[in-house]
Amino acid sequence: MERRWPLGLALLLLLLLLLCAPLPPGARAEEVTLMDTSKAQGELGWLLDPPEDGWSEGQQMLNGTPLYMYQDCPVQESGDTNHWLRSNWIYRGEEASHVHVELQFTVRDCKSFPGGAGPLGCKETFNLLYMESDQDVGIQLRRPLFQKVTTVAADQSFTIRDLESGSVKLNVERCSLGRLTHRGLYLAFHNPGSCVALVSVRVFYQHCAETVHGLAHFPDTLPGPGGLVEVAGTCVPHAQISPGSAGTPRMHCSPDGEWLVPVGQCHCKPGYEERGGSVGCTACPVGSYRRDMETLHCLKCPQHSTTVSEGATICTCENGHYRAPGEGPQVACTRPPSPPQNLSFSVSGTQLSLRWEPPKDTGGRHDIRYSVECLQCRGIAQDGGPCQPCGKGVRFAPGASGLTASPVQVEGLEPYANYTFTIKSQNRVSGLGSSSPSSASLSINMGHAESLSGLSLRLVKKEPRQLELTWAGSRPRNPGGNLSYELHVLNQDEEWHQMVPEPRVLLTKLQPDTTYIVRVRTLTPLGPGPFSPDHEFRTSPPVSRSLTGGEIVAIIFGLLLGIALLIGIYVFRSRRGQRQRQQRQRERATNVDREDKLWLKPYVDLQAYEDPAQGALDFAQELDPGWLIVDTVIGEGEFGEVYRGALRLPSQDCKTVAIKTLKDTSPDGQWWNFLREATIMGQFNHPHILRLEGVVTKRKPIMIVTEFMENGALDAFLKEREDQLAPGQLVAMLLGIASGMNYLSGHNYVHRDLAARNILVNQNLCCKVSDFGLTRLLDDFDGTYETQGGKIPIRWTAPEAIAHRIFTTASDVWSFGIVMWEVLSFGDKPYGEMSNQEVMKSIEDGYRLPPPVDCPAPLYELMKNCWAYDRTRRPHFLQLQAHLEQLLTDPHSLRTIANFDPRVTLRLPSLSGSDGIPYRSVSEWLESIRMKRYILHFRSAGLDTMECVLELTAEDLTQMGITLPGHQKRILCSIQGFKD
């Protein structure tokens, strides 16, 4: 003991300096200490083995408090050293199963001893061991029962120089004893030969401290014997679990006493918000609110609302302010508006215009609506005269309620009557309080015009050249009233005004059997009133009388002379016409320019009529405009807009019709052309020709009324239903078109503008030929019609009609072939993006449109027959109709798909690409072979150039999503055409 004390005294002095320095911070978990030698109040009294030559206990004073520690430095011994130090029994209890030990110690470097190598058997480590026991076993060491925990080595050892300078490093070692099962334990320290000083020993266990997380409280929790311990939390005051959350908040206590893996949380109840750090909920202060848990924080009350206590979920409106139904608590409270300002009016006859300005106070809203109330007073309302609500005869335009602004037109007022109008201003919060809506009133005296509805014209007597009319109306209530009347009379040719003093008139110098439109209005010293509704009256036909014998002979002679004259004129014109046709044929053969102008001659020549409207009426019914209701615009025609409307003929049901109008600003030439189309349509009667219902010529605008086709134009209809119609349905539609064209050709007409856009489709998919603006009658001699100018639809027109402007039934057959192609391609544009010049050149070079996708072979053969260059080789419409009927009765023949020849899809050289490939891009190529639906498939596969597609196979197309055999065949055939 004496041989080690000087060194031990030095160690104690240095350790005393180390203890004055701050210790490293502890773990985040809360710790419960079972034993701490640094806080011992007396000697520790641990068991030493051997008791004299091994470990020794020392004491030093630190801040007036004794500090007890153990040291051992067997520097004089040779060989291995076996010094043991055992602690007293440490009571663990029944709680913690994991116990930790923290050691503070110093170890001397063996090389710091004299000689450099240190004493024989010098070590720089020692061992920590433990033994479990349910009770104190006294001074029995029982070395074999101890289990080794670890070999403790110093991170930093000290030398003799450190002793001299006082800079010895203090080491700290922490270790766990594992899972314990007994009530207590012993610690043992085995020194195999190191110079060590054990400054302090602390035995403790860790637990998860009580905490608040996510507004949930979690109690103090001990770690479990293995893994994490799930602990359910409880929401702090004024917090709750939000609907739809994962359930009760939970956290997990780890073996190290730390809270891990939080699941779920609580939220502050409405009216409360989180305090800093999510540790609690505090009530919203006065003047703020929190409506629901989705709102993060308390919000300031909107304008004109407040709260009277803390924790409010909604702000109540101030007195006189309200929220409209459906408005949330975040909306400011508003109030009803003040009355409208500056009421004024103007009078024209019995028509009254009321005006006002918006209220001075809108109540903070922009949804102000106005309503007008009318009272009719016997006397002056301000003097207390009796008043009663105005009757149904008083009408308001645009209405009497729900108005957003002035003015309001009032009609149907009686003359010489007093009225009081009340204008009310309201918004969505009006009526929520006890007060009635704000209003302002205006009293008006009507005193100068006859009521519009009070005049009703009646026919008293009619003759061929005069009409006697009368009308009844209210007489002036003012005895001094001076009333007269103004009549407005018009027919198709003339109109005039006539003043009469009494409600009766005799109209003279009229045309026999002619319709006249008459309307009347009253005149007073204060001005004229409005005109009454139009009334139609027709004069009687001329009175016939018996003829004398001389007159009969003269009439017969005149008829015979006229017949002879007509026969002579017919013979003369026939011979002259024959000579002219022969001359035209000679000029056409020698390419001599023709100078004679051929005038258009329809079946009925309107120029033969002095009144062209009368010519149209010979083949069409004149409709009363009152029978028509014009609804919405459905298109724009050559002469004006086209409307959808309704037609109700007398004693017939109402039917939907299409109404074509002529613009009022159209020149006279347009009027003739407009009526020519009606004249032509009026001569047709076929289920596949658009039916003419009638015309309106006596009123402007002039109108042509036809049956209404629900599905509109054929081309647009097909585009909307691509791949939705079966081949049989398409053949049935083509059969209807062929039937209608056969009817036209049978009546010696050429349509000249046959295209899918001019075919209309009804709800039963029945197709009807329409648009006869270019339709003309063929020459009886050679069955042709020749024109000198005008526009030609190149893509639909036969080559001889383009080159020589000679139209025949065969040129309509060519156009029908193009229509067939449009139908089978579901409305595609013929010849794609080729220009008109390229189309004409391609046709002359033998180019014909390729078959559409999945086109039945018999239909494509029929198309090519229609496109024969020699017009005499084209089939007649009767043959086409018969062929289509045969296909319709044999649907199996439509299953064969037309072979696709890639050579017919080549563009002109001006559109070709490079390197022998006739297309600039993949999309241009796919569009030319009618496969543009697969452009995105090729782009997705990275095939952006024509060179990339040359090696495609059927398997490649299937992987790209192109699975229809017919479509694969078309694409691969086109690629093979490039290679060939």
Image (tube, rainbow, N blue to C red):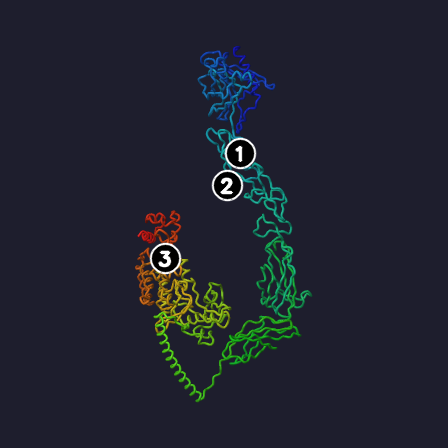
Residue named by callout 3: 908
* Residue 613 position within the rendered picture, expressed as x and y whole percent measured from the top left: 47, 74
Amino acid beneath label 3: Leu
* Residue 675 position within the rendered picture, expressed as x and y whole percent measured from the top left: 45, 71
**The one of 957 and 416 positioned closer to us in this rendering:** 957
Residue named by callout 2: 245
Number of the label disc, if any, that sits on residue 141: none
Using residue 530 as the reference point, say whether residue 587 is left or right of it: left
Residue named by callout 1: 218
Amino acid beneath label 2: Ser
* Residue 702 position within the rendered picture, expressed as x and y whole percent measured from the top left: 49, 70
Amino acid beneath label 1: Phe
Q: Earlier in the sequence, mark 3 or mark 2?
A: 2
Q: In this rendering, does residue 836 appear at all?
A: yes
Task: Label 1: state its secondary structure.
Answer: strand
Q: Can you tell which of label 3 and label 2 is closer to the viewer?
A: 3
Work out whether 176 lies above or below 237. Answer: above
Q: Residue at x 53, y 20 (%)?
A: 169
Q: Mark 1 Cα within 10 Å, few/some/many (few <14, many 20+)?
A: many
**The one of 910 and 502 positioned closer to us in this rendering:** 910
**The one of 748 and 258 positioned closer to us in this rendering:** 748
Task: Label 2: state its secondary structure.
Answer: loop
Q: Earlier in the sequence, mark 3 or mark 1?
A: 1
